[in-house]
Image: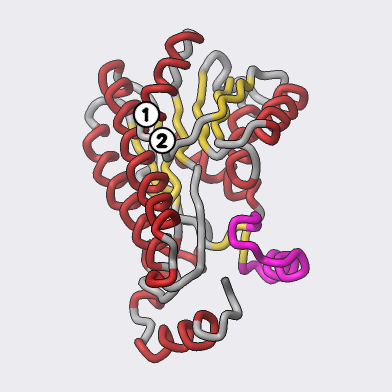
Amino acid sequence: MNYELEGKWAVVTGADGGIGIEFCRALARRCCSLLMVSVTVDPLRQAAASIEKEYGVKAIPFTLDLTDSSSVSMLGAFLSTRGIEPDFVINNAGIFSFRELAETPEAKINCFIDLHVRATTMLSLFFARRFKARGSGRILNMSSMSCWMPMPGLAMYASTKAYIRVFTRSLHYELKDYGASATVAAPGGIATSLFGLPDNLMRLAVAVGAVEKPDRFAEKAVKAMLKGKKQYINGFINRLAIFFIGITPTWLRMQVKRRLLDKGIVK
């Protein structure tokens, strides 16, 4: 524990597990109070209680469906009622699917757009206006290495994550002259349940370095945010992989489709 952020508040979305709760722990270790947001009820309450017990900071659970068009105003009203003025915002909530776009239900497509595009945009805008006016504040938005991957099966995930990256980089430059910042994190594989990898394969992936443990990633991403960095990509291999992803030939991308999508190996 250190007292670097004592007296400050952070809003973290998707905070009930995975990378989200690790973001909360990384901030709580610095004595930052937390408003933890998720669509869940009991898992979120349990996560907040565990943070308070372990670190002795305030951790308030706030159940909110970010795909609801009124979610930002509801969050603003809650903050106002509690007298909370956040110093940091981490837009972490997200979804994933590996499926042909033509086979993806319209409701799922709408969820990608509402959660990754609209909610991230409007939450960032809501807090960017506040941070600009007062001359301080940090935003961290979660993109993904997939934002450089026009691969079959990843159309909605990759394209919406690409939006988050470009949007956040632009917002960073707009806020820079006002003492605030926006950081985009574009991680490679992270060992969470988001991708549905079986436990044995997940352990193997961590052992060989193909994925990173969420606590390690969250700590580094929070450090980048606090320093006002414009972008954080975890690991030299991931940064190097961006180049090779860009030159991936069409025949290899088609193998992904035919072997994994067409045969239903990954769903």
Specify the amino acid type for callout 1.
Ser
User: Looking at the picture, how far across and down is residue 89, in whole percent?
Assistant: 45, 31
Name which residue lies at 39% across and 69% down: 101
Specify the amino acid type for callout 2.
Asp
Q: What sort of colour scheme is used for the picture?
A: secondary structure
Name which residue lies at 41% across and 76% down: 152
Q: Quadrant of residue 251?
A: bottom left
For the residue labelled by badge 2, is the local secondary structure a helix, a strand or a loop?
loop
Name which residue lies at 41% across and 52% down: 112
For the residue labelled by badge 1, is the local secondary structure a helix, a strand or a loop?
loop
Q: Which residue is mark 1?
A: 70
What is the number of the mark on residue 219? none
Closer to the camera in the image, 68 or 152: 68
Task: Please report the bounds of the magenta region as a residue range.
Answer: 191-210
Q: Quadrant of residue 171?
A: top left
User: Looking at the picture, how far across and down is residue 237, in whole percent?
Assistant: 51, 68
197 drawn magenta: yes
Q: Which residue is mark 2?
A: 68
Above or below: residue 203 compared with residue 66: below
Please give the count of numbered marks on the rendered protein: 2
Residue, far bottom: 251
91 drawn magenta: no
Q: Are marks 1 and 2 in contact (CB under 8 Å)?
A: yes
- Taking 129 as reference, is 110 left or right? right
Closer to the camera in the image, 216 or 69: 69
Mark-to-mark CA distance, 1 and 2: 5 Å
User: Looking at the picture, how far across and down is residue 174, in whole percent?
Assistant: 22, 36
User: Looking at the picture, how far across and down is residue 68, in whole percent?
Assistant: 41, 35
Closer to the camera in the image, 185 or 79: 79
- Taking 146 as reference, is 6 left or right? right
Above or below: residue 237 compared with residue 169: below
Closer to the camera in the image, 49 or 96: 96
